[in-house]
Image (cartoon, rainbow, N blue to C red):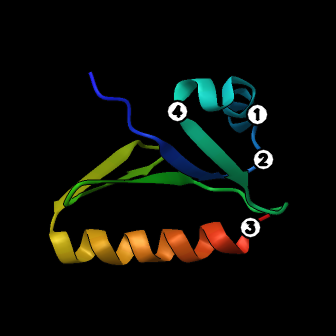
Amino acid sequence: MKKTMSYIIADSSSFSQKLINQGEADFRQIKILPEPTILGGTIIVYGNKLGMISYGNELKTVIIEDAHISEILRLFHSLAWRSLS
């Protein structure tokens, strides 16, 4: 199975700290948003698919398959990634 590097932008939750401790051994690089930012969900972009997961009172998921929308989200992620230290 091919390993794909993940570039994660996360808040400073305990779950994020666990991911940081596992580090690049699990093919991921992580940057943490400044406090007091709290994310209430996740966005995953893979190929031409986009998955959005909300962690509110009720777990909600949306999957969109669209190359243009996926590319826009990749651009936003890239801009955010470069702006974080």
Badge 2 vs badge 4, beta-carbon distance below 8 Å: no
In which quadrant is the C terminus drawn?
Answer: bottom right
Q: Residue at x 60, y 23 (%)?
A: 25
Give the residue number, with chain letter if any, for mark 4.
Answer: 27
Residue at 39 percent of width and 38 percent of height? 4
Which amino acid type is marked by label 1? Gln
Spot occupied by residue 11 in the image (x, y as percentages of width and height): 71, 52
Q: Name the residue under label 3.
A: 84
Residue 10 appears left or right of 79:
right
- In this rendering, position of residue 15 left or right of residue 34: left
What label does residue 17 carry, if any?
A: 1
Dot 2 and dot 1 residues touching (CB under 8 Å) = yes
- Please name whichever residue, 69 or 61, is drawn nearer the observer in this view of the structure: 69
Q: Nearer the viewer, residue 15 or 71?
A: 71
Q: What residue type is labelled 4?
A: Phe
Which of 68 and 82 lies nearest the eye of the viewer?
82
Is residue 55 something that shows in the picture?
A: no
**Cα separation between marks 1 and 3:** 17 Å
Point 71% across, 56% down: residue: 38
Distance from the alpha carbon under mark 3 to that under mark 4: 19 Å
